[in-house]
Structures are given as structure tokens and as C-alpha cells.
Amino acid sequence: MNITGILIAAVIVAVIGLILGLFLGVAGEKFKVEVDEKEVAVRAELPGNNCGGCGYAGCDGLAAAIAKGEAEVSACPVGGDACAKKIGEIMGVSADGGKPMTAFVKCAGTCDKTKVDYEYYGVEDCKMLSFVPNGGPKTCNYGCLGFGSCVKVCPFDAIHIIDGVAKVDSDKCKACKKCIAECPKNLIELVPKETKHLVQCSSKDRGVDVKKGCQVGCIGCKMCEKVCEFGAITVTDNVAHIDPEKCTNCGKCAEKCPVKIIS
């Protein structure tokens, strides 16, 4: 190939490149997606765990919702107050710091405290046990199954199975609610970290039936409800529940409980 042919080829390639560049530039301007600067700034302050605890599809989804005013600046359970304050400054609103929350498992039925109807050998997944007799091997139909479905979904290593029951490390828990959604027995709820007294039971059976399956189950005697001076304890469906907003942590309910199920 002579020098003329090489030059012609080079010119053709250059022209084609120029045309394509101009086309892409025009197309980019025509079809570009406008980015909200506040959304970008908010996303930069979010921790990036993408845990879904805020109710949105990851941090990008939450950032977009906050920028549009569809979510509170304090919606991220992982970032906490510090994150909320920074996002509040970006959005020009005040970030009211709420109480730090933690997950709590309403069951104290450890291996030495509960009875089992049979030995289970199979897939170790709590949701799968809904297909086996009695919903699991434990005599109590309401207790923790102990196969760790909640452990598997926790992105913060804050929950573990100890002696057959899920236990939450409140120092690690970020209140993302993933364990709550995963538990088929609905045993987990969010409570303020400062709460000192909670009922570790969810059984709705009568007291006599509770005792057949668990040594530490709530028997619905209402003694805690009667001794509480602040109306913080109610017994519904044979199980006591403490309202953390009303509880003053006086400890009288724990002292009076005959089965010592109030932690």
C-alpha cells in the first residue's frame, strides 16, 4: 500500500471518529438525566450498607426519597443521629434525634428450659419448619426455633443463636429490621436500647399449657400488670407486654414475676 492510500484511510477514520463523537455528544445532551445535587450530597452521607432497613431499595433509593421530601432525614437506621444531622443540614431542616433502637427477641426458651416433642433432622431454616409437625420440634408453638434464619440476614453480625435461642447484641444492632421480617414466629421487635425491662415470651397459651413446654414462659397471671403504677404492662392473650414509652424501669414487675421472665 502506498503512502497516499494510508493517508486516505487515516483521514476517513478521523472523519468517522469526528462524526461519531459529535453524534454521541448531541445524544448525550438530548437524553441526559438531570441529577438532583441534593440527592447526590445526601447519598454521599449515607453509610452505604444497602441493608434496606429504611424501607427503600438501598441507599440510592433512600437518597432519592429524602431529596424529594418523601422520607425523613433520619430514616437511615445505620447512620444514626450523626448521619441525620448532616443530611438535615443538606436539606435545610432540623434532624430530631430519636432514641437509639435495638432488636429484641421475645423468647427465653433455651435448650435446658424447654421440652421437645421429637428430634428434627433436616434443613436448618426457621421458615422451612412451618412444614413439619407442630411447626417445629419444640413443644411450645410460639418459641424461637433456633435455626438462625435471623442470623443469616443480619448484615451487622448482631444476632446469634445461643443455647437454642436467638440473642441480639444491642451494641452491634443497627435496628435495620431485617431479622424482624425474617422471623416466621414474629418473635422480634424493636425497642429503645435504654429499656431495662422486657418480657421474654410470646406464648398465647394458658398458664398450665405453657408450663408443659417451657419452664420460663409467661403464665398470664397479671401480677406484673397489677404492680405497675404507670400502666406500662398489659396482659393480652395470656402474655404480658411492656410499653417502653411508659415504663420507668422501676423494676417492680421483674421482682413480682413468679417465673422471672421479665429481663
Image (tube, rainbow, N blue to C red):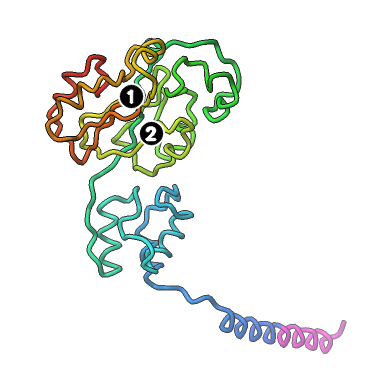
Please identify, in this view, whether the residue under mark 2 or under mark 1 is nearer the observer: 1
Q: Residue at x 34, y 36 (%)?
A: 103
Up the image or down, 54 lies above or below 65; here it is above
Tell me residue 71's x, y (percent). Answer: 36, 61
Residue closer to the observer: 230 or 88: 230
Gap in angstroms between the C-alphas marked 2 and 1: 18 Å
Q: Which residue is drawn at 16% across and 19% down?
A: 255
Tell me residue 24's x, y (percent). Answer: 64, 81
Position of residue 206 in the picture relative to residue 136 (left or right): left
**Magenta extent:** 1-16
Mark sitting earlier along the chain (2/1): 2
The residue that mark 2 highlights is 188
Position of residue 141 in the picture relative to residue 42 (left or right): right
Tell me residue 147's x, y (percent). Answer: 49, 24
SS class of the residue under badge 1?
Answer: loop
Question: Which quadrant, please, contains the N terminus?
Answer: bottom right
* Kind of residue at disc 2: Ile
Return the mark for residue 238.
1
* Kind of residue at disc 1: Asn
Tell me residue 27's x, y (percent). Answer: 62, 82
Residue 94 in magenta?
A: no
- Mark 2: give few (<14), some (14-19) or many (20+) Cα within 10 Å: many
SS class of the residue under badge 2?
Answer: strand
